Image (cartoon, rainbow, N blue to C red):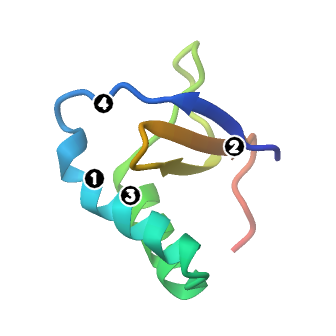
Amino acid sequence: MPWVQAEVETLPGFEEFLPLFTEQERAVDDEDWEQADACYTQLRSALTMTFPDGSPVAEFMLHIHHDGTAGWRWHDELFAS
């Protein structure tokens, strides 16, 4: 699952999630994996990702950085719990 990188254009509604993405980035930078996982769990419960055809992505990780870029990766099947 390679990471895809892109620039981000934020739209109305993004502000609600900005603190969580900021905390996720801080946790990753500090190698605080427990907090990074907690952020991931919150983001996954609140957000969805779709393919260009509108079909849902089964599993994904999304990082939106303070510099206006994003990184994400996805998988066609849910991860085993």
Image marks 2 and 3: residues in contact by CB distance under 8 Å? no
Query: Three-letter amino acid code at disc 3?
Result: Phe
- Residue drawn at x 52%, y 51% as measured from the top left: 63
In the image: residue 41, left or right of residue 57: left
The residue that label 1 is drawn on is: 18
Amino acid on which disc 2 is placed: Trp
Contact between marks 1 and 4 (CB within 8 A): the answer is no
Q: Alpha carbon of mark 1 to alpha carbon of mark 4: how far?
A: 10 Å
Q: Nearer the viewer, residue 75 or 8?
A: 8
Q: Answer yes or no: do the residues labelled 2 and 1 have beta carbons within 8 Å?
A: no
Per the model, the C-alpha gap separating discs 1 and 3 is 5 Å
Q: Earlier in the sequence, mark 3 or mark 4?
A: 4
Q: Residues within 10 Å of mark 4 (few under 14, many from 20)?
A: few
Q: Residue at x 70, y 35 (%)?
A: 4
User: Residue 6: x, y in percent?
Assistant: 58, 29
- Label 4: state its secondary structure: loop
- First in residue order: circle 1 vs circle 4: 4
- Percent across and percent down for residue 20 are 33, 63
Q: Sequence order check: which comes first, mark 2 or mark 3? A: 3
Instruction: Tell me the amino acid under the disc marked 1.
Output: Leu
Crowding around mark 3 (Cα neighbors within 10 Å: few <14, some 14 to 19, many 20+) is: many
The residue labelled by disc 3 is: 21
Disc number placed over residue 74 in the picture, else none = 2
SS for callout 3: helix
Decide: marks 3, 4 in contact (CB < 8 A)? no
- Could you tell me which secondary element the residue under label 1 belongs to? helix
Looking at this view, name the residue that lies furthest to the right. Answer: 1
Q: Mark 1 and mark 3 in contact? Answer it, CB < 8 Å.
A: yes
Q: Which mark is residue 10?
A: 4
Q: CA distance from mark 3 to mark 4?
A: 13 Å
Distance, label 2 to label 1, CA atoms, is 21 Å
